[in-house]
Image: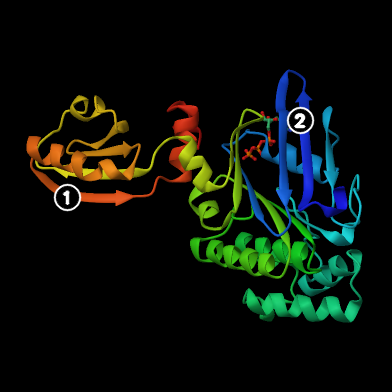
Amino acid sequence: MYFQSNKVLEVKAIGKEYGKIKAVNGLSFHINKREIFALLGPNGAGKTTTVRMLMNIIKPDTGEIKYFLENSQEEFPKTELLGYLPEERGLYQDVKILKTLVFMGIVRGMDKTHAKKEAEMWLERFELSDRKNEKLNTLSKGNQQKVQLISAILHKPKFLILDEPFSGFDPINQEAVIEIMTDMKNDGTTILLSAHQMHLVEKIADRVLLMNSGASVAYGTVEELKRDVAVDEKIIIHFSDVPLLSVFENDDTVESVKQLSKNEIVIYLKNKESLSATLNKASSLYNITKVKTEDISLHEIFLKKLGVTAEQKL
Ligand code: ATP
């Protein structure tokens, strides 16, 4: 039965077309309680269209979306249970920051005193306390973004949808966003985020869905995705001379080889066990000056799933 399920959301074969463009094309996935789930993909992949369908802002042409945030299946949950950071940030520009946040809290079911207390706590955490009585449009873009984020999380939603939460933030604030998501998850919030910054998502997402052209390209935990592309180890080797890629490509244990620069190559191995044999071979043929092993990144998984053309899009 639904209410015994661990899922908070189930999406079955949703589709949305705009004229001839299939913005989303038969997309299915589910989100488990208390997980951080990431929709990833290049510009135009269909992430925002998906998020808007989840937020009931637009209706899917096909397929269905079901929530299970309370004790039964819901078409769409009560607004108090949801937090939403839209891609197009839309808070009132000429209203004082604290006032806006308190208003947003009240709209989501908080009483005024509680909303004010929480808003002040978050403004303090984001080092914006001294600006609380200024209008939003007096803040820098990044600081406006912080206020937008606070307005989405103030009421401690059960399910939080963040469309491009990292955009507009510098690397330090991107890390702060990651920390906030982790804290909220630990406090019981389930989070869906959309992003194209794979290196950030990799740090926090329990599961990911890689999208391209409205459809799923890969879906699962990062570990599952790694197994899916059959790469267990990645070695970067720097030689004093120029190596021939074909020497390594013809090996059964090698998934693929790529030239990084004139003297440097990356070898993707199907299994870690063949690492020393590969290095022995490399050193018997060329003079190695530097070796480094790394985990394959989500970005590389995505490129492997799509082919090199995706590289330009990301
Ligand atoms: P980005 O990372 O650039 O925000 P995205 O993955 O969020 O991209 P969407 O905004 O969902 O992608 O767009 C998916 C496709 O649907 C694109 O080709 C886009 O041009 C098209 N599209 C989205 N909304 C509309 C609309 N209202 N009218 C026409 N086409 C649309």
Quarter residue 280 falls in: top left
Task: Give 34 or 83, whichever is nearer the viewer.
Answer: 34
As drawn, the label of residue 202 is none
Above or below, 158 against 41 in this view is below
| Disc 1 target residue | 290
Quarter residue 141 falls in: bottom right
Describe the element under mark 2 as helix, strand or loop. Answer: strand
User: Mark 1: which amino acid?
Assistant: Lys
Is 232 on the left-hand or right-hand side of 31? left
- Per the model, the C-alpha gap separating discs 1 and 2 is 48 Å
Quarter residue 60 falls in: top right
Q: Are marks 1 and 2 in contact (CB under 8 Å)?
A: no
**Residue at the spot 50% in from the left edge and 28% down from the top edge:** 306
The tally of labels here is: 2
Describe the element under mark 1 as helix, strand or loop. Answer: strand
User: Mark 2: which amino acid?
Assistant: Ala
| Disc 2 target residue | 13
Residues packed near mark 1 inside 10 Å, few (<14), some (14 to 19) or many (20 plus): few
Residue 88 appears in view: no
Q: Position of residue 225 (x, y in %)?
A: 51, 41
**Residue at the spot 19% in from the left edge and 40% down from the top edge:** 277
Above or below, 59 against 100 in this view is above
**Residue at the spot 82% in from the left edge and 79% down from the top edge:** 116
Q: Position of residue 233 (x, y in %)?
A: 34, 44
Residue 79 appears in view: yes
**Mark 1 or mark 2: which is in front?**
2
Above or below, 307 against 160 in this view is above
Is 309 on the left-hand or right-hand side of 118? left
**Residue at the spot 78% in from the left edge and 77% down from the top edge:** 118
Residues packed near mark 2 inside 10 Å, few (<14), some (14 to 19) or many (20 plus): some
Quarter containing ligand 1?
top right
